[in-house]
């Protein structure tokens, strides 16, 4: 991984952890796809209809890992 990529991810981590009320893991859309077993289009649709609430940093959306697990549990019942 290039130095500028490491710096970019370090800045994102700092932004996500800068909010003292937030102390949960955040994942990007690619990880959401893997955790839910869905396509990129489905992640977009879940975001668009409000099922998944993203936190936007730069041009990317990040999602709460705990919310993803709640959603997965809800639909696996």
Image (tube, rainbow, N blue to C red):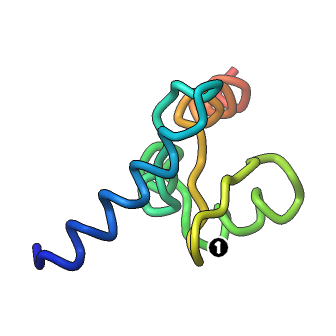
Instruction: Find numbered disc 1 in the image and state the secondary structure of the residue it sits on.
Output: helix
Label 1 crowd bin: few (<14), some (14–19), many (20+), radius 10 Å: few
Q: Quadrant of residue 43?
A: bottom right
Q: Is residue 26 left or right of residue 41?
A: left
Q: Is residue 44 left or right of residue 58?
A: right
Q: Is residue 31 left or right of residue 63?
A: left
Depicted 2 relative to depicted 62: above or below: below
Q: Residue furthest right?
A: 49
Residue plotted at (57% across, 55% down):
62
Taking depth in this image into account, of 35 and 26 the one nearest to the observer is 26
Depicted 44 relative to depicted 10: above or below: below
Residue plotted at (65% across, 24% down):
21
The residue indicated by pointer 1 is 41
Q: Quadrant of residue 49?
A: bottom right
Residue plotted at (55% across, 66% down):
39
Q: Position of residue 53 (x, y in %)?
A: 76, 48
Q: Position of residue 34 (x, y in %)?
A: 42, 52
**The C terminus is located in which quarter?**
top right
């Amino acid at each position: 991984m290039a130095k500028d990529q490491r710096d970019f991810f370090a800045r994102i981590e700092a932004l996500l952890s800068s909010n003292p009320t937030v102390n949960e893991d955040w994942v990007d859309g690619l990880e959401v796809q893997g955790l839910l077993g869905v396509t990129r289009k489905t992640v977009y649709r879940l975001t668009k209809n409000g099922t998944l609430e993203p936190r936007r940093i730069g041009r990317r959306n990040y999602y709460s890992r705990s919310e993803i697990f709640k959603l997965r549990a809800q639909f696996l019942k």
